[in-house]
Amino acid sequence: MFSNFIIEIFLTISGVGAASGLHYENNNIFLIADNSNYLYTYLIAEKRLQKRLLYDRNGHTERVPKARKLDLESIFKYNDTFYIFGSASTKNRNHLFKLRIRNTDPVIHQPWTDTFNTVKESLSIADEDLNIEGSFIYQNHYYLFNRGNGPAGKNGIIQVDLNLKDSAQFFPVVLPRFEKGTAGFTDAIRVDNSIYFLAAIEGTESTYEDGEKGGSLLGKIDLETKQVQDLTMISTTHKFEGITLMEEDERKLVFLLCEDPDDESLETTIYKLTVQK
């Protein structure tokens, strides 16, 4: 267990709600929200929010209704490119966006419907059990973190060849059950040879409907063995949905977290989580 950790409010951002993923770099926070079609950039020093449109669907770009939203849930940066995935939990949510941060570079939109259908078929994952909440690239593979809040509880890591040629693999990750529900992935990042992940406890067996919140955990997985090494409850009330590394030294790791309050507010609280190594 992470025996020594400190979690505190880092800052509050106005103008964006339902935050579902974030990336920290050069004193900027890059944010996505599950009901928005924008990539947001918060310039910490200037206390200023910018936004970049990823996809315009007949003018519905923010506060998109649940049945029509892209459900953007994971963001990471690989080389000089941002990758942003939808959750794939419905046919509207099978999207991958790639972009560099320079405004002169176009947003690359790649529908992943066929790819996700192939993944589901090859791994025997039912439509109602696919729910991608985190992702990164490592050794020429996408690592996609499936939240096990569907009927079959398929919490685990889906490994997909970067060139979409080799067969996908699934590595189940068993997380504990609590009174309010079973924990399931909400985001993950790679730090050296480890995966640090967030998992939320929620009273639902649906990838579509929200349930009663039961808290959030921080976990650590060995990158090679895919085995959980540490797991600690970091909140009994918050549903943390995004994690990014802010700083690291020989003694500690400092992460930034975002949460989805499951309401209609346009305000996001960013938390700082300090963990001793």
Image (spheres, rainbow, N blue to C red):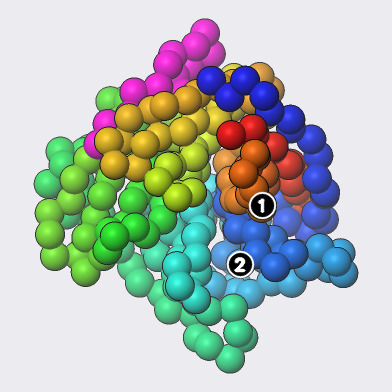
Query: For mark 2, what is the residue?
Result: 38
The secondary structure type at the circle numbered 1 is strand
Going 53% across and 88% down the picture, which residue do you hit? 105
Label pair 2/1, CB-CB below 8 angstroms: no
Up the image or down, 226 lies above or below 41; here it is above
- Residue 87 horizontal/vertical position (percent): 42, 50
**Residue 41 in view of the camera:** no
Q: Which residues are magenta?
A: 171-183
Regarding residue 17, the answer to whether it shows in the image is yes
Magenta-span inclusion, residue 141: no
Please tell me which residue is depicted at 15% across the width and 38% down the height of the picture: 124
In this picture, residue 54 sits left or right of residue 134: right
Residue at position x 87%, y 69% in the image? 46
Q: Quadrant of residue 194?
A: top left
Crowd rating for badge 2 (residues with CA inside 10 Å; few <14, some 14–19, many 20+): many
Q: Given the image, on which type of amino acid does mark 2 rest?
A: Tyr
Q: Is residue 183 left or right of residue 129?
A: right
Tell me the amino acid under the disc marked 1: Glu
Q: Which residue is mark 1?
A: 247
